[in-house]
Image (cartoon, rainbow, N blue to C red):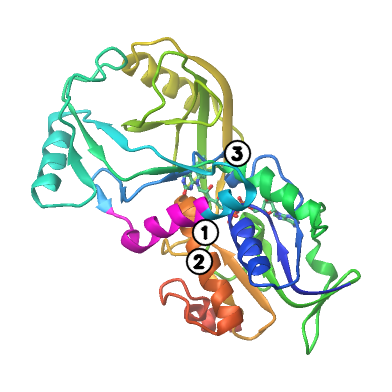
């Protein structure tokens, strides 16, 4: 079997990459083993222009957010599903200092941080003593709808193998790569944390980060916004279901859900929410984060047939469409990849 590009992994990176390659008329085979707890399957899907307590504008937000909105709509139109919604964040200030910081951001003219005029609007749902503000625009990507729909599409086109890719069976030749009975011009790894062990990429400065979240049934809470007060409460596709999280842990023994996270999150909800809730699921997984918080995009400097789209960290939902497009344009039209994401910045490390 001959294909132009073999894509390993169908998380959010492999989904957009295979989508763009097929749109460009490339022949593609995707191999994905359908792991149940991959970050793309447990993420909230938040696409947020500001980050952290200090509401810092995220890297390349002005380009990446509008791109993501259009990209999810376009793939959704192709698949005839809804893959993205605008859900602005209502930021409830946990103390007067946070309120002050938020107001200063508004005064500085920040384009994403806004006052919320109806301060009492959420009184029947939440306890909040220090008021609230609004962050907008914020989107939620519906990965729980998009990933299976794109998978079915690949299956219909007969271009998906559902199995574990075994790197020891990969043969690199002068003209491309060979894997089992597949000959391909390029192989591109979109396999998330599995790339940490990949002999071609294991020297990259990956820094896995553990995240936990709860899925909670809250029948009386409107799904019009994302609600934030330290934690985020994020509306999910399934009616009356909300994603609550997440933790960010750099130092961990295993990837399992912890009782400590569940207990502390339920405690926060008990104090914050005025309406009843019921925990239905506890999720946990590893983010493919990187030491310098920038993704890894491009082809291996010494192995021109081997590429990677990875290192999305906490921002896979916003970054993946943008960099899948850049990698596709780089492959087909030799267009440059954004300097901070381009794999060639690690040429020395990858030559070792
Ligand atoms: C709790 C939590 C919450 C998050 N919330 C958000 C959020 O709200 N917004 C946001 O932008 N990001 C969020 N993230 C981060 C986001 O989930 C990741 O950045 C993103 O999903 C990474 O996607 P990926 O495609 O690179 O990797 P993955 O999702 O890991 O996909 C890799 C795929 O490759 C497959 N695979 C791996 N190895 C093999 C192999 N050997 N053979 C075959 N297949 C293989 C896996 O089965 C998987 O399908 C969150 C992460 C966590 C853990």
For marks 3 and 1 on the same chain, the one whose residue lies earlier in the sequence: 3
**Disc 2: which residue:** 323
**Disc 3: which residue:** 144
First to last magenta residue range: 57-73
Left or right of residue 3, residue 120 in this image = left
**Could one spot residue 289 in this view of the protein?**
no
Against 143, residue 74 (above or below) is below
- Cα gap from disc 3 to disc 1, whole angstroms: 16 Å
For marks 3 and 2 on the same chain, the one whose residue lies earlier in the sequence: 3
Residue shown at the point (17%, 24%) measured from the top left: 119
Q: Position of residue 99 (x, y in %)?
A: 15, 34
- Confirm if mark 1 falls within 8 A of ligand 1: yes
Q: In the rendered image, which quarter contains the N terminus? A: bottom right
In the image, 58 versus 259, the foreground residue is 58
Q: Position of residue 135 (x, y in %)?
A: 27, 41
Q: Are marks 2 and 1 in contact (CB under 8 Å)?
A: yes
In the image, 302 versus 205, the foreground residue is 302
Q: Position of residue 157 (x, y in %)?
A: 79, 57
In the image, 269 versus 155, the foreground residue is 155
Residue shown at the point (60%, 39%) measured from the top left: 144
The numbered mark at residue 320 is: 1
Left or right of residue 290, residue 14 in this image = right
Left or right of residue 2, residue 228 in this image = left
**Could one spot residue 344 in this view of the protein?**
yes
In the image, 235 versus 288, the foreground residue is 235
């Amino acid at each position: 079997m001959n294909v132009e590009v073999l894509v390993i992994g169908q998380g959010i990176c492999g989904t957009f990459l295979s989508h763009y390659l097929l749109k460009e008329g490339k022949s593609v085979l995707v191999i994905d083993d359908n792991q149940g707890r991959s970050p793309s399957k447990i993420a909230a899907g938040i696409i947020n222009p500001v980050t952290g307590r200090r509401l810092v504008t995220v890297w390349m937000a002005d380009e990446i957010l509008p791109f993501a909105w259009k990209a999810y709509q376009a793939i959704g139109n192709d698949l005839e599903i809804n893959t993205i919604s605008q859900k602005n964040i209502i930021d409830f200030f946990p103390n007067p200092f946070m309120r002050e910081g938020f107001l200063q951001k508004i005064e500085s003219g920040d384009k994403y941080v806004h006052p919320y005029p109806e301060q009492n609007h959420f009184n029947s749902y939440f306890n909040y003593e220090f008021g609230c503000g609004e962050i907008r625009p914020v989107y939620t990507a519906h990965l729980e709808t998009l990933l299976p729909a794109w998978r079915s599409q690949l299956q219909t086109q007969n271009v998906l193998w559902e199995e574990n890719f075994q790197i020891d069976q990969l043969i690199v030749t002068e003209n491309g790569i060979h894997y089992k009975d597949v000959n391909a011009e390029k192989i591109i790894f979109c396999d998330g944390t599995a790339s940490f062990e990949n002999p071609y990429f294991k020297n990259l400065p990956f820094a896995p980060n553990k995240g936990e979240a709860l899925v909670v049934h809250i029948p009386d809470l409107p799904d019009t916004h994302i609600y934030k007060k330290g934690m985020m409460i994020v509306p999910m596709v399934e009616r009356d279901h909300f994603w609550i999280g997440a933790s960010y842990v750099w130092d961990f023994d295993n990837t399992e859900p912890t009782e400590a996270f569940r207990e502390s999150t339920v405690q926060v909800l008990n104090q914050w929410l005025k309406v009843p809730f019921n925990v239905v699921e506890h999720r946990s997984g590893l983010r493919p984060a990187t030491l310098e918080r920038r993704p890894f995009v491009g082809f291996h400097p010494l192995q021109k047939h081997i590429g990677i789209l990875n290192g999305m960290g906490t921002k896979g939902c916003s970054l993946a469409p943008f960099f899948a497009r850049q990698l596709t344009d780089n492959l087909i039209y030799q267009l440059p990849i954004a300097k901070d994401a381009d794999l060639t910045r690690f040429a020395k490390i990858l030559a070792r």
